[in-house]
Amino acid sequence: MTKQPTYDLIVIGDDLSSHVAAAYASHCGLSTLLIAQTGLGGLHLIGDFVFHLDPTPMNGLGPNQCGRKILEEMGIELPAGEEDPMNPAYQVLLPGHRLDFCNTPDDLLSELCREFPDLEAEFRAFYEAASDAAAVFEAWLDKHPRLQPATTREYLDYLKIFPHIFRYKFNAVRFDKVLTAHPLVEKVWEAQQALCSFNLHDLFSFASAKFNCTPFEGITSFSQGKQYLFNELIKKLEVSGGLYLSSCRISSLNPGKPAGVELFTADGTTSHLSAQNLIVSTKADAMSYLFESKTYSSLADRLRPARILFYPFTLFFGIERNCLPEKLARHAAVVPDVNKDLSDHNLIILDTPQAASNGQFSDGKTAMSATVFLPDNEAAWQVDALKNEADQILEKLDAFFPFLRDAVLLSSLDQSIDLSKACRSILSPKYFIRNAALTSFAAKTHQTRFDHIFLSGASLMTDAGFAAEFITGKNAVQSVLRNRS
């Protein structure tokens, strides 16, 4: 066993928030080690096809948005020529209907009214209310990056925005009655939330204004997908003097001061590492070591736990591109049956890479992923159950893409199963998280009962969507910096 020098900070996690935390800490001058146990990142190669592992659309990366600001603070730029938002941002497909969620209010309203002309006034009133509320929410998040008020001054600030919250809730209740009377439209709104949000608790929380306005905020897409972000963050970590370790296993964790981590590396070496501070992703296996004697990391977590409802299961397959409609968006939420609940095997998230700038795929082939969300129970994740689920996915997609089965060039169910399980440390599941008693936010603290150990991860700030990966990573590092000052 080799003993290594003590770091200022060890970050444990495979997800994007862990990479943000490690890069930001190293950028701020902390001697930092990032332990990414799988090192999977954002892309995976199967055969000749490159697959994007995470179907979650990337928001928060537009000009002056929180994710972009954090990257720019570290000197990380988005790839030149690829920062423009997608239009449409995403699609919702139902039997006999395709809705393009365009990135301007007028175009989106025109699209909705084309499909549901009798509801134009209701759509217009709702989006006016949602746009106003989304602007207030973004301003609050920019000024209060922990989202949840924690001091008397912050609660006084919160009271100033409460009239906006009340106004949006009032309009949302009115719109909810419209959805109840029109089940098809209701499925459209539920599909949007399932596509963009990690919290399935409240379709019309105050933060839902942000998700309803996601097309206007913009969805970003890179040719390398999220892998570009992983690569740039690792580069920033290492250029700033930090260390990145992957393909390793943590065998024990001592939360004392300094904190100790026992690590088995890929070459079979056992190392004992120590740090003055730890940041642990809420999706990391190390959480079980850190809090093995207690179920909850803090009193707040005990009162409002982040309960996992569904994990993503993804089928990865390579196909002939001509079997898909020309106007299929990069991200699409498919609802096969408008009469069933989405949680009843009734939602498929498609992720299909975009064509080249000339609109053509050079070899006529493309990778495609189809993701469903399965309950967090052992029975649903048995191999036979997953094989049956895969058959159902293809059968349901037949109704929307009748030539898909015949156009499959590569399909590996075994690798899809293995990847879906391995990606639990990277991808965000669907949570049930109640709003705090005194506010309209589902945000949770990154503090733990240890004053030198902090958390990162999207479950801490599901109200921010994908941007939570950036915000929670930075928030945790700032707590470490405050400890040192």
Image: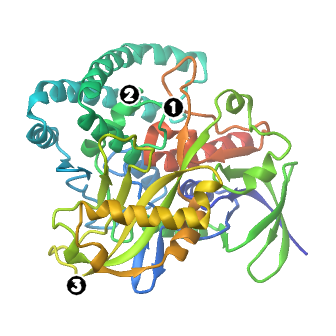
Write down the residue under mark 3. Answer: 362
Q: Nearer the viewer, residue 125 or 23?
A: 125
Amino acid carrying label 2: it is Phe
Amino acid carrying label 1: it is Leu
83 on left or right of 326: right
Write down the residue under mark 2. Answer: 204
> Residue 423 in the image: x percent, y percent?
57, 63
Mark 1 Cα-neighbour bin, 10 Å: few <14, some 14–19, many ≥20: many
287 on left or right of 335: right
Q: Nearer the viewer, residue 4 or 322?
A: 322
Amino acid carrying label 3: it is Ser
Q: Nearer the viewer, mark 3 or mark 2?
A: 2
Q: Could you tell me if the residues under marks 3 and 2 are in contact, i.e. CB atoms within 8 Å?
A: no
> Residue 176 in the image: x percent, y percent?
31, 24
Q: Nearer the viewer, mark 2 or mark 1?
A: 2
Cα distance between the residues tagged 3 and 2: 43 Å
Regarding mark 2 in the picture, which secondary structure is present there? loop
- Say whether disc 3 or disc 2 marks the residue closer to the N-terminus: 2
> Residue 376 in the image: x percent, y percent?
60, 49
Write down the residue under mark 1. Answer: 147
x 40%, y 40%: residue: 341
Locate the C terminus by quadrant.
top right
Report if residue 236 is visible in the image: no
